[in-house]
Amino acid sequence: MTDEQPNRLEPLRQLAEASDDARLLDQVMATVEVLEKDTALVLDQTHIARDMASRTKAGDWVGNTELAEIMADADHFLRVYKQQRKEIGRLKATLQDKQTRLKTPE
């Protein structure tokens, strides 16, 4: 598997930065929180799958080949979702800053 574009969340970031509507930003924040929770679950499950694959390597070539593919896929997902987790954190900080600015009277 190949890694996708460096920042898959860029469209969501652009939406957050382009909006000055507090209700829309609340909805974007709710979406980001769902992504954050889902990303954490994917990372946890991928770590478990990778750990299982590395611990259960059997003596047969076919089994080892399949387990090696599982580990390669798990490594790919770990890279993608760890990067996504970082981007979610940055996006949340941007949203929180913008929400604070919009809620603070000038």
Image (cartoon, rainbow, N blue to C red):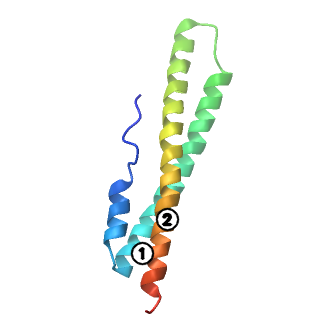
Q: Which mark is residue 12?
A: none
Q: Which mark is residue 26?
A: 1
Mark closest to the chain's N terminus, 2 or 1: 1
Secondary structure under tag 2 reads: helix
The image quadrant that residue 29 belongs to is bottom left
Disc 2 vs disc 1: which is toward the camera? 2
Asked if 2 appears above or below 103 in the picture, the reply is above
How many neighbours does mark 1 have within 10 angstroms: few (below 14), some (14-19), or many (20 or more)?
A: some
Asked if 23 appears above or below 95 in the picture, the reply is below
**Amino acid of disc 2:** Lys
Of the 4 image quadrants, the one containing the N terminus is top left
- Residue at (40%, 43%) from the top-left corner? 6
Asked if 79 appears above or below 32 in the picture, the reply is above
Q: Looking at the image, which is closer to me, 26 or 95?
A: 95
Can you give x and y, in whole percent of width and height, for residue 47 in the image?
61, 37
- Are discs 2 and 1 less than 8 Å apart at CB? no
Alpha carbon distance from label 2 to label 1 = 11 Å
- Residue at (38%, 61%) from the top-left corner? 13
- Residue at (49%, 57%) from the top-left corner? 88
> Which residue does the numbered mark 2 point to in the structure image?
92
The image quadrant that residue 64 belongs to is top right
Can you give x and y, in whole percent of width and height, for residue 63 in the image?
55, 13
